[in-house]
Image (cartoon, rainbow, N blue to C red):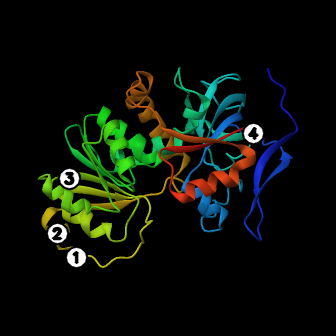
């Protein structure tokens, strides 16, 4: 068994200028239902950027350290945990604290690393997997044979969502911010990727004969996309919002909501209970992991930065140049 050190390194945020530095502090201790993880890699998410700015404060019981997903090795297990032991390879959705070389995570939010995945690939899984599964398959009940539109297809959630929806039998359409990204997303399995900077996705779908025929829409954009989503949605269509990058306010004609019997919903992952997230993990292990193991679904890793360059990694994410996940290596 590995010796547990007394100190760990983590990313700290200056409260005055919001700059990032590497600090040292005491090791966390695994509670009865947690794993203590020696972190090899951590995934970046837009929530981290908002938290750094003070716009997305962590829950009172969460770690104040940024970082919502990690991959590494189990160092110790809590007294109430079964099925895990020190030395196991694990990826996890953390309750904060991922930007550190050691962290804890609820056992119900931990997943085994698929056999041939690198630590960097594994760190790209938890947040995107649970977000896609919860919103598209739990909330929107996406079924094989249906048509799904995923906005922000070049994001970590988008790239994983495209391959997962295709693997589970849906036809996928998407939007992205450049022709290069659009062609790459089509190569990954999207039927058609629309460059939202130069094309109107509603007009493109209408040209394809898909107006009023999109069964499920996953949207990170909001703003002017809200009305367009309603317009292209099929009768009994389901639209789920997970962010409002283009704005949370819009003037909308809700008439089609009644005529088409649409469902509009939304969610954030962090606000849900450990029990709810544990159910997501159980369903993912059953429904998604066979596709991860056989290689039909795999996360896209754009770039890997060392922990000391966490600020540069976040700046790169904010620039929107990336496609897939950005990872910190410990």
Q: Position of residue 182 (x, y in %)?
A: 34, 48
Q: Position of residue 45 (x, y in %)?
A: 56, 52
Q: CA distance from mark 4 to mark 2?
A: 50 Å
**Which residue carries the number 3 mark?**
214
Q: Nearer the viewer, mark 2 or mark 3?
A: 3
Q: Is residue 168 above or below residue 273?
A: above
Residue contact between numbered discs 1 and 2, judged by CB atoms under 8 Å: yes
The part of the image, by quadrant, that contains residue 61 is bottom right
Residue 212 visible? The answer is: no
Q: CA distance from mark 1 to mark 2?
A: 7 Å
**Which residue carries the number 4 mark?**
101
**Which residue carries the number 2 mark?**
256
Q: Is residue 222 above or below residue 114?
A: below
Residue 10 visible? The answer is: yes
Which image quadrant: the C terminus?
A: top right
Disc assigned to residue 253 = 1
Seen from the viewer's position, the closer of residues 285 and 12 is: 12
């Amino acid at each position: 068994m590995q010796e547990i050190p007394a100190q760990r390194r983590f990313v700290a945020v200056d409260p005055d200028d919001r700059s990032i530095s590497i600090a040292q502090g005491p090791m966390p201790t695994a509670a009865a239902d947690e794993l203590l993880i020696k972190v090899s890699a951590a995934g970046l998410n837009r929530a981290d950027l908002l938290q750094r700015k003070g716009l997305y404060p962590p829950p009172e019981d969460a770690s104040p350290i940024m970082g919502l997903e990690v991959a590494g090795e189990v160092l110790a297990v809590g007294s109430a945990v079964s099925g895990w032991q020190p030395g196991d390879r694990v990826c996890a959705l953390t309750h904060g604290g991922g930007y550190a070389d050691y962290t804890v995570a609820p056992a119900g939010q931990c997943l085994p690393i698929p056999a041939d995945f690198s630590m960097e690939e594994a760190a790209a899984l938890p947040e995107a997997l649970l977000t896609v599964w919860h919103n598209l398959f739990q909330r929107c009940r996406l079924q094989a044979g249906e048509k799904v539109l995923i906005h922000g297809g070049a994001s970590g959630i988008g790239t994983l969502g495209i391959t997962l929806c295709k693997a589970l039998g849906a036809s996928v359409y998407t939007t992205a911010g450049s022709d290069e990204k659009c062609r790459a997303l089509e190569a990954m399995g999207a039927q058609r990727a629309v460059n939202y900077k130069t094309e109107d996705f509603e007009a493109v779908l209408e040209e394809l004969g898909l107006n009023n025929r999109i069964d499920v829409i996953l949207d990170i954009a909001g703003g002017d996309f809200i009305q367009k989503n309603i317009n292209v949605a099929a009768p009994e269509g389901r639209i789920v919002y997970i962010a409002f990058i283009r704005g949370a306010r819009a003037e909308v004609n809700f008439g089609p909501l009644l005529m088409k019997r649409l469902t509009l919903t939304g969610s954030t992952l962090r606000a849900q209970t450990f029990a709810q997230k544990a159910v997501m993990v159980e369903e993912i292990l059953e429904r998604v992991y066979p596709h991860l193991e056989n290689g039909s679904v795999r996360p896209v890793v754009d770039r890997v930065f060392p922990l000391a360059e966490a600020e540069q990694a976040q700046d790169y994410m904010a620039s929107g140049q990336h496609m897939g996940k950005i990872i910190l290596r410990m």
